[in-house]
Amino acid sequence: MPHELILLKNMSQPGYTGSLADYERAGGYQAIRKVLGKMPPGDVTDLVKRSGLRGRGGAGFPTGVKWSFIPKDHPGPRYLCCNADESEPGTFKDRQLMERDPHQMIEGMIIASYAIGVRIAYIYIRGEFVMGAKILERALAEAYKAGYLGENILGTGFAVDIYVHRGAGAYICGEETALLESLEGKRGLPRTKPPFPATNGLFNKPTVVNNVETLANLPYIVNRGVEWFMAIGNPPKSTGTRVFCLSGHIKRPGNYEVPMGITFREMIYDIAGGMRGDKPLKAFIPGGASASFFTSQHLDVKMDFESVAQAGSMLGSGGVTVMEEGTCMVWAAENLLHFFNHESCGKCTPCREGSSWLLQILRRIEHGKGKMEDLGTLARLCPNIAGRTVCAFGDAEIAPILSTLQYFRDEYETHVREQRCPFRRAPAPDLIAVGHG
Amino acid sequence: MADMVNILVDGTPIAVEKGTLVIEAARRLGIMIPHFCYHPKIKPDANCRMCLVEVEKMPKLQTSCSTLVAEGMAVRTNTAVVEEAHKSVLEFILANHPLDCPICDQGGRCDLQDFSHRYTPTKSDFLDVKRVFQKEYFSPLIDKEMNRCVQCLRCVRYCDEVIDAKALAPIGRGSRTEISHFTSHQLDCEFCGGCVQICPVGAFTNRLSDYEFRPWMMKRADTVCGYCGDGCTITLQSREDELIEVISSFEKGRNSGDLCARGYFGYQFVNHPDRLTMPLVRQPDGRFEPTTWEDVLPLLAERFTQVKLAYGSEAVGGLITSRGTNEDLYVFQKFMRLAIGSNHLDSAARFGHVNAVEAMRRVQGTNRWTVSYEDIVNADCLLLIGTQITWTNPIAGLKVKEAVKKHGAKLLTIEAMQPSIETTSNIANLSTTHLTVEVGRHPAAVHGLLKAVFDEGVADNHLAATASGYVDRTRAAVSALPYPEGMDEATLRTIARTFAGSRRGVILIGQDLLQSPGGYEASVNLMDLLLLLGKLSEKGWGLAPLTEENNEQGAIEMGATADYFPGAASLDDAAARTRIASAWKESPPVGAGMRMLDMLEAARSGKLKAMLIVGENPARTLPASAKPAEALGRLEFLVVQELFLTETAKLAHVVLPASSYAEKSGSFTNSEGCVQKVRAGLEPLGGSRPDWEILSAVSVLMGYPLEYGDAAEILKEIRAVIPGYRVLGATPEPARVDRPAMDRYVGGGFAEDMASRYRATSNITQDSSYPWSLWVGQSLFHSGKLSTMAKGLLEIQKEGRLYMNPADLQRMQLAEGEMVTLTSVAGEARVPVGALGRIPRGILFFPESFKEAIAGLLTMTPDAVTGVPYHKQQRVAVHKT
Amino acid sequence: MLIEPYKDRIAEILGRYPEKRAALLPLLWLAQETQGYVSEEAMREIAGLLDLTPPQVFETVTFYSMYNLRPIGRFHIQVCRSLMCALVGAENLLSWIDAKLGLKTGGTTPDRMFSLHQVECLASCGTGPMMQINDEYYERLTQAKVNRILDDLRRDGKSDLASGPFMFPEPSNKSSESSCRTN
Ligand SMILES: Cc1cc2nc3c(=O)[nH]c(=O)nc-3n(C[C@H](O)[C@H](O)[C@H](O)COP(=O)(O)O)c2cc1C
Ligand code: SF4
Ligand code: FES
């Protein structure tokens, strides 16, 4: 099946620098000319709704529908936040989209702002992306200079300002309400919902949070139409392409943009070149660290929202991490739990206490100090976290444990029985840090 | 009702108001859903996840603390799934919780203990190492044990949402989150004790009582705090007649559980080793000799009788603190009026509150507020003038904060302190419009407000039509005034316009206004303001003067001032006199009473020969320049009833040990006029006795038996004599404006002093040799002298410092704690300096509880109408030496 | 100290937000940029600027992992330890650094040149093992590259092995289509 690049197209051209001139030369900033002052904002939302575009940040919520929750007649400001926090282990696409072709996302933000009636929009970018932030600042300056931002854009009377706001190291700030708290200068603790950001978002005003990749799609949907977009991927539920991020024991890791609906086998073996060292594939994560592990039996699952969910995991952020035979699943789960424990914001009891407890158990098992009862405890604690927390982090942190327990229980048992890791000499555990600083 | 929502909780139907949380709806049915982070005082945060319930048609369990009821909702709190969820959250909390319950002060009243008990987890599957936070010193008063913390953040949220101090910070992230102040600094806050009280476990405890008790061993008594006029319900917890701690339950009292530093940490004066426990009689050589009640009582009767016989009743005067119970105050004035036969008596209400009461009596015909705390909370606009509210009346301050922070009321402040963010709250930070004025200039600001009312054209048209004389003359008087020098006209206009444009507004005034020259006139003028806006008699509107001491309102209503009989009736009110005479079966003396300053003057001149002083300390309270000690020293017979051997007691011939509020029963009347029960938590210390009991015993020996079996009997008599006291309870029905009185005022009464009330007051005299304005006032941690006997409060503030703006300190090149010399026309003093951002530049603040250090500096002017001695403000020079 | 020389920048930052507190993270960045860490003084000053109490600033600072509360080495090496990098040898990377600098996680070299921390995923999963040093990313590391980078930094204060604008796999020269077309 041939497929055309959309989001990665410009940057794949030799010599493309992502400058405004390059972007314009490639057809950039035409979409806003079609939209601003030409289409009623409601029609833009409608267009996006009909395109079937779903959020690329993780949850896959239909973008147009999300916009339509913004109260129509709300007086006072509304806000758009571009979620550029990209911190999900296994995911590195937004970084590339921003650093290589910042204007397509900025154009997307202008379109979204117009549709929702936004005067000020923010790009919340993770603190580590210093280069990304600089590139975006430069691109914004170019766009201002060209009259695409600020007052009276293209003489249409429409005005929007975009600011870059840097995070400072906290995975949870990718969760949209934590992002808003963080943007407000607070600790990034997710908010209890309802109320939702659509009514009570940034500064308590109606707000839309959209992922970088989601926004980057907008100019193309406007330029080429709903029908074109709907035909890509696995319609009606999964339209368009996704930029998948391939990592792990794979020959050609990296970002690949493909229409949704191809299989993991095609992705891993045909596109990304197959397994590094040609060892058999043991397991893979289909959608970032928060997604349940898959095994080789899932290779023919289609890479779209529904198919992956049906198979018991999620497409999430599009990060596909491949692990070869010989990789210890307990070790992998422990590594991820270290991440989750480190990144739990600490608001909810089950997530806060659960993540450190689970980590301690996994660490013991991995280091040859596990007990058979621990397996029962793991299985018992996980469902007491999922679904009982403020944000979806609680659901995420148990995914690696439950799925490895499901598919690789024997490996856990071997660890306990032999009181050692059968695969590798793991490094000595560092104790859970206590206190701060 | 349209706003009711019907839901089912565990099958039982209940109708609750729209907007009710499920957890509250269940509580009304007696179903207690376990919870940690929820507290009715603060916004739901739903972080502990303990309160999960099943809601029909919702796939996931919901937190009942953050879920609002919806019509037809069916909630289940007791299914197996819910039970399991509760158990599992507890399991998570307990995983890292230390098992130090045996040595935890919260043991026995700990939510975690109670829920654990309820869900009886038999054994824990937690096999790993418990998290350990390093123990760190937190503060002298509040101890912190982070290993016990359940991270519900109730303390942090309370400190922010209710107190507005923002002194507590959750630091770190995830399972390493702990509560801290700023970096490794020890806690610097207003020490309201709220974090200790609201902590569901033992993470915060009161260091003053650390490890002193097990909760169930303590004797409890619900009573009313003896510090300020806010009238907070507190529970005294004692063991073997030692006061161990003071707490307050949020379901109870006008304060609904909130307290301030004085209320929460200021109780240890009660068991202070320096308390007087035996009567003392001065010997010819000047020493005090301890004696017994049996010996001292006849001596008192004899000496008072001698003075009466020799010089007449008029030669005896009495002075009482307004910290006593109504019963003490009532028996005191009755003792003075009957046993002694003199109207020369006064109370500490003379220091300012009489100004407000006199104004209210004159204009609206009441001697108390026509509004209540509820009216403050529900107001949509509050005007604060000279209150310094969070320092002097912290709980009334919380009502203001609640109105502003929870209900979005507008706050207008004309205050001596400026906005400045610190980790103690500052009401000016919440202002919609703020005007900083120097103490002493509040009356001028009131002039400005009235002028603005006319300039903005917001005066009530109806009144202009019905009482044109009043309106026209007031307008004329006010228009003749310039806007007060140094005050921004636009700000005054905004304040007037905003207040006039609101739906329900209350004016709160406090010590800075009432205890400064012009305090009386300004109070009347503020009632003019309400009248002119057409609001004085409207429901929810009114003037609310705050009282410094806990029972100033009671002191006036009990008749314990020179001007009034019980019921705050004028001495020349014939009907009142008849009523009282028939109740007392004897007529009270005729003739005007001498007020505090008059009595001192009379003592000085030799007209007054004897005085009975109960709990008041004029030798210290009045400035040295007024020479109170010298006057008292001239008396032939001075009796002082006191807790401690004060400066005044030291001058006495007989000193009698009195019981503290914690040791007696009776009632207090708070600022808002709410009469509340005072209950003894301890036996009287040593040989001390309640003031009324002492006077009652002396009266018997003098042949004028004022005999009462207990305080309740006195209250019964009070109720018979004072009309209003029959119907009052813990929730006051505020007084109503007395229409005839108001009509009299508007109809001509206003004119009596029109000219002087609306006379332009110039800026406080600028004097280049005394360039600074020193303001002496109450501080957050101390009020009067009692608090300086409380160990806890001394831990936070142990001395008086001269506070000035940090910029001034810098300009003077002074370091905190450095000594400076102050001079004024009256004298000189040496004190250490401190920095405080809320003090405006050019102003100096000194806490009056330590004012002996600066006593020599102050001068005093009495109010021409009300005799209030003004001595809060002084021009001084600062010398860096 | 902080405010005076940066008045304009601070004003510009404040101008981006309708509420002052929102400027907190950017101002903390400014403080860290200028001082190398966020000092107590800076926190107090920022609190004053934003009408916050110092504890409110402190609670925010400590939530985020990138603000340093005390001075650290001139080059802050942060090695990603999350699964994707761990699969491709993040541990080796640590041992290479140790071999080169005698530096272990959490430590600082005696000359205060380098500090080393392990961090969670830096969004460079396809190009591991990787590290961030101050503002720059260094990816697809080998022992030789690590040695060169560290030498470069010590000598020149920078290294041209730092990543540029990110794209991986790098675009092929010929086509705008994906290099792995499946037709
Ligand atoms: C724990 C957690 C972390 C998340 N991190 C990210 C992230 O880094 N980037 C992102 O775009 N969305 C992230 N999300 C999803 C956002 O909450 C939100 O759904 C998304 O930004 C919405 O944008 P979209 O509709 O365009 O996908 C995260 C969600 C959770 C629960
Ligand atoms: S689930 Fe975890 S990360 Fe999410 S709000 Fe709760 S504690 Fe924070
Ligand atoms: S009480 Fe509801 S979540 Fe804590």
Image (spheres, grey):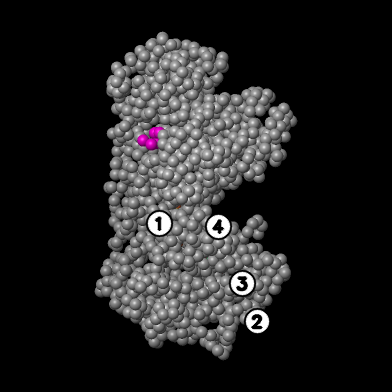
Residue A5 seen in the figure: no
Earlier-in-chain disc, 2 versus 3:
2
Q: Secondary structure at mark 3?
A: helix
- Amino acid under label 3? Ala
Tell us which disc is closer to us: 2 or 3: 3
Q: Relative to residue B297, is residue B804 drawn left or right?
A: right
Q: Looking at the picture, do discs 2 and 4 lie on one chain? A: no
Residue B263 within the segment the image draws in magenta: no
Q: What residue did someone put label 2 on?
A: A25
Q: Which residue is mark 3?
A: A141
In the displayed image of the protein, which residue is found farthest to the bottom?
Answer: C174
Quadrant assignment, res B852: top left
Mark 3 surroundings: few (<14), some (14-19) or many (≥20) residues within 10 A: some
How many other residues sit within 10 Å of disc 1, few (<14), some (14-19) or many (≥20)? Answer: some
Estimate how packed mark 2 is, as few (under 14), some (14 to 19) or many (20 or more) residues with alpha carbons within 10 Å. few
The span shown in magenta is: B785-789
Q: Residue at x 74, y 30 (%)?
A: B465
- Relative to A314, say whether B394 is above or below: above
Total labels: the figure holds 4
Report x, y in % for residue A424.
30, 78
Image: A146 above or below B229: below
**Front in this rendered view, residue A180 or B16:** A180
Give me the chain letter of mark 2. Answer: A
Task: Look at mark 1 in the image and give the residue it sits on.
Answer: B183
Q: Secondary structure at mark 1?
A: loop
Q: What chain does mark 3 sit on?
A: A
**Left or right: residue A330 compared with residue B451:** left
Instruction: Calculate the distance from the C-alpha at mark 2 to the C-alpha at mark 4.
Output: 40 Å
Residue A192 image position (x, y, % from top left): 50, 57
Chain at numbered mark 1: B
Which mark lies nearer to you, 1 or 2?
Answer: 1
Q: Residue furthest top?
A: B309
